[in-house]
Image (spheres, rainbow, N blue to C red):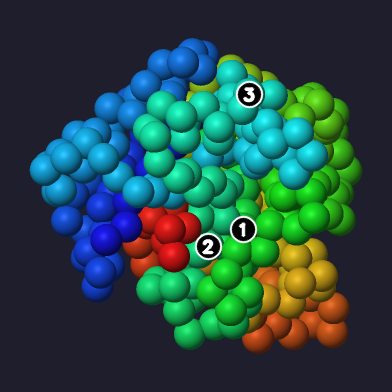
Amino acid sequence: MKIGVDLGGTKTEIIVLSDDNTPIFSKRIASPRNEYSATIQCIVNLVKEASTTVFGSHNVDSIGVATPGAVSSTSQLIKNSNSVWLNNKPFHTDLSLALNCKVYIANDANCMALSEACDGAGSNANTVFGIILGTGCGAGITINKHIYAGKNGVAGEWGHNQLPWMNDDELIFAKTQTCYCGKNGCIEQFLSGTGFARYYNFCNGFSTNLKSEEIFAIADTGDVLANKCIELYEVRLAKSLGHIINILDPDIIVAAGGMSNIERIYHNVNKHLNNWVFGHESATKMVKSQHGDASGVRGAAWLNQ
């Protein structure tokens, strides 16, 4: 059996998978905000509850944890996390000591990609590029069902590259937004759910403050601006993925996160990909994740293999 924990900015989830990868215990709670020690204790409490329920004991040999950011190969501290209270902390060491067990840690997007590569939408592919289109915009890479994290642990961090082939309108918007990483024009500022909503409200001169789900709802009623913003989102997603295909050329792209639940984007993005891939043809397609928002926690459990 395998235990996985997905530590997110808004929720923390635990899962126990049987030997045939069937979930036999799961629980999701709100994540502590801005408190490092409370974050550690939150995970400890979940692991104790899961292990007591499933095994009848607090003792476990190992767990896998999906985290925002990555463990620095130089300092062994967390870096690049949008849950900023984790940055520059020995999270791996502290959690291992608190649980008295071995802890495997990987970036949450890498865990999502691993889950989908092992027994999800990318299970028949050799190279999977897994993208998360949620509050942020991350991605992970798996090759032959193993995470490829890279020398610096940042392989797949497409969200903090600049949106490629920006037009004048996109350049203007980019100058008004500064990403938490300190740069302007990041893909995350356009393709995350918050970025999509911010662009719509920007087009309205910020006279509105709608969330992404509200924008999609009014698009269904025929709102012209909402539909235009969705069309632009699809093109931006296609050219951002075209950039990835030109570099990595994955077999498949698997999408998760809130924005991935918009069914129309798959047809339209795959149609647009040919415009941005070198040679103007793309056999690589974007598909929806099989395990949805459980992909991250399932992938964390797979880290135990």
**Quadrant containing the N terminus in the rendered view:** bottom left
Residue at mark 1 to residue at mark 3: CA–CA distance? 22 Å
Would you say 110 lies left or right of 31 here?
A: right
Closer-to-camera residue (270/72): 72
Q: Position of residue 34 (x, y in %)?
A: 51, 14
Residue type (three-letter) at the residue carrying disc 1: Gly
Going from N to C along the chain, the mark reached first, 2 or 3, is 3
Residue 26 vertical placement versus 35 (above, below): below
Q: Any mark on residue 140, and which?
A: 1
Quadrant in which residue 145 is drawn: bottom right
Marks 2 and 3 sit apart, C-alpha to C-alpha, by 25 Å
Disc 3 residue type?
Lys
Mark 2 highlights which residue?
113
How crowded pointer 1 is (Cα within 10 Å; few <14, some 14-19, many 20+) is rated as many
Q: Which residue is mark 3?
A: 89
Among numbered discs 1 and 3, the one appearing first in the sequence: 3
Are the two marked residues, 2 and 1, in contact with CB atoms closer than 8 angstroms?
yes
